[in-house]
Amino acid sequence: MKPEFDYQHFIDNSIVVETVEQLEDFLKRAAGSDIIAVDVESAGFYKYYSRVNLIQVATRSEAVIIDPQKISDFTSFQKFASTSKCMWVFHGGDYDISMLARNLGIFIPRMFDTRKAAEFLGQRELGLRALTEKYLGFTLDKRLQRCDWSRRPLTAAMKEYGLLDAVCLVPIFDFMVRELDELGRLDWAMQESDYIAHEAREAVSPQKNPFAFRIKGSSRLSLRSLAVLRSVWELREKIGERHDRATFMLLSNLALLEIARQMPRTVSGLSVIKHIGREFLNRYGTELQTAIREGLESDLTDLEPPPKPREHLELLNAWEGELAKALREIRDSVANRMQIPASVLAPSHALYELARVRPESMGLLLQSELLHDWQARLLGDDFLAVLQQEPPQKMRKSRRRRRRKI
């Protein structure tokens, strides 16, 4: 471990913020910080609803755990986030930022993502544990990764685990900024981090998929069994939502499939299915029978997801396919020279779209927004040399064909 980084000092002097007054006091102390590292814990593995159960925050001098289960008013944190000039540091921050925005109305204005930075540095191991080993010389204990973070009171082990994920980000940020600056890639990492933050802030809750009951193994079921599966799956969802429990902890997917295959009409028939827990059967046996009966009597016409609309099958003609291939070769060559993943420089779908719309100047390339600003300026000259080519005469009227993988 680096001698200048004493993480134990942060752990020993940390506090759990459980009141609005404590939160306001901490934010006053943090107001002058140049950096605020944040990590969020949720109990989504155990609960039906994904909520922020803990927020760990570290500055250069202090670390705290903020408990949303005890604090009902986050107005001070919302104002602090909207007006702060500090750099917010996350690791793989898209999920945490979206959770803070949706659950608590806290919108992170700008951030530095250490996971994205690791990609720009050409590192193969991107997890926080790997970064801690590389930069700080010790290994994070991840045994509590699947802990139920809604449990109270918090144990000492839970507090230390949560705090370390935020505390370690502060010195890791310093190391990474220096390395990125030396390589001339700091601005790229900052642009990508800002893009991640923007996308996460704007993210909306996904709509429920009406075909989510089509779980692994269901493709071999008859239509009638599929109808029973859907009915029982919907019952499991209702029970999970009612009691805020993860659905797999109530009734496993294996149990759902066996019920759908056997379609038992009695409690005794259900009891021989070994994947159904005795407690679940005792509490919900009657509801389960009703769901099976509804599946047996239901319509069979809406069990298959509709085919994708034809307009979603985007097409390239032969010339455009050649352009996409040339763009990919340029991107891969640059990525190989820089020793970073090719997808960081430009995602494949962007290359495909560029070959289709063919912007012929840097201005048009930037306006297309298919590449981020730094990507366009890094690859633009070579890409434009390809995109400005005229297709051979015989290809200009060639029929379009289905998209090729690039």
Image (tube, grey):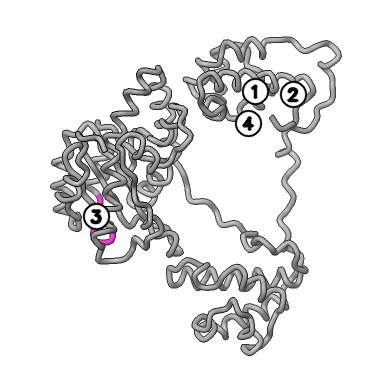
Mark 1–mark 3 Cα distance, whole angstroms, equals 50 Å
Mark 3–mark 4 Cα distance, whole angstroms, equals 43 Å
Expressed as whole percent of the image width and height from the top left, the position of residue 66 reads: 24, 53
* Residue named by callout 4: 349
Up-down relation of residue 244 to residue 37 (above or below): below
Label 2 with label 4: CB-CB less than 8 Å: no
Residue 363 is left or right of residue 25, and the answer is: right
Mark 2–mark 4 Cα distance, whole angstroms, equals 13 Å
Q: Residue at x 63, y 31 (%)?
A: 349
Write the start and end of the magenta stretch as one range: 68-74
Residue 357 occupies quadrant: top right
Q: Earlier in the sequence, mark 2 or mark 3?
A: 3
Residue 318 is left or right of residue 118, and the answer is: right
Crowd rating for badge 4 (residues with CA inside 10 Å; few <14, some 14–19, many 20+)? some
Crowd rating for badge 2 (residues with CA inside 10 Å; few <14, some 14–19, many 20+)? many
Q: Amino acid at mark 4?
A: His
Q: Residue at x 67, y 13 (%)?
A: 386
